[in-house]
Image: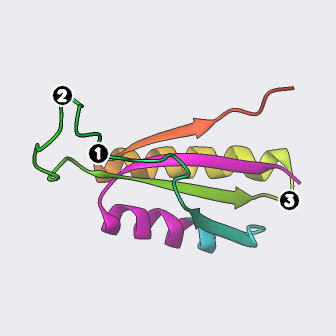
Amino acid sequence: MPTLRLRLTGSEDDARAVINLLQSLDGIEHVEEVADMMDRMDDSDSSSAGLSDIRGPDAHELEIEAPNESTARKVREAVEALAFDLDALVEFEEEED
């Protein structure tokens, strides 16, 4: 069973729209937003110390289990089309063989 991982750069509404799309696709049983595992510490010696925390769109990490490669390809195509319509950025993590 292929597991797709993607990073969506966009608003909470964009992420919710993508998750709703994924859950509506036939054969998709598992869609989960996973936590960003990267440590984000504000170092007092950093050149960005004291700068505003207001930044651009958020990044959302999603994990999707597809029953087969054909469905995984349909997931990629559908998510790319929706992200284009939403003016959001989507990146798929490629599995190393």
- Which amino acid is tagged 3? Pro
- Sequence-wise, the earlier of marks 3 and 1 is 1
- Label 1's element? loop
* Disc 3/disc 2 C-alpha distance (Å): 46 Å
Q: Which residues are magenta?
A: 1-21
Give the residue at x 39% y 47%. Answer: 40
**Label disc, if present, on residue 42 of the rendered structure:** 1
Asked if residue 13 lies in the magenta stretch, the reply is: yes
Position of 47 with respect to 6 (left or right) is: left
* Disc 3/disc 1 C-alpha distance (Å): 41 Å
Within the image, what quadrant is residue 65 found in? Answer: bottom right
- Which amino acid is tagged 1? Asp
Q: Position of residue 55 (x, y in %)?
A: 18, 48
**Label disc, if present, on residue 67 of the rendered structure:** 3
Q: From the viewer's side, name the closer residue of 86 and 96.
A: 96
Give the residue at x 46% y 42%. Answer: 90
Q: From the viewer's side, name the closer residue of 73 and 92.
A: 92
- Label 2's element? loop
Give the residue at x 17% y 52%. Answer: 53
- Sequence-wise, the earlier of marks 1 and 2 is 1
Which one is closest to the eye, mark 3 or mark 1? 1
- Label 3's element? loop
Position of 40 with respect to 64 (left or right) is: left
Q: Are marks 3 and 1 in contact (CB under 8 Å)?
A: no
- Which amino acid is tagged 2? Ser
**Label disc, if present, on residue 47 of the rendered structure:** 2
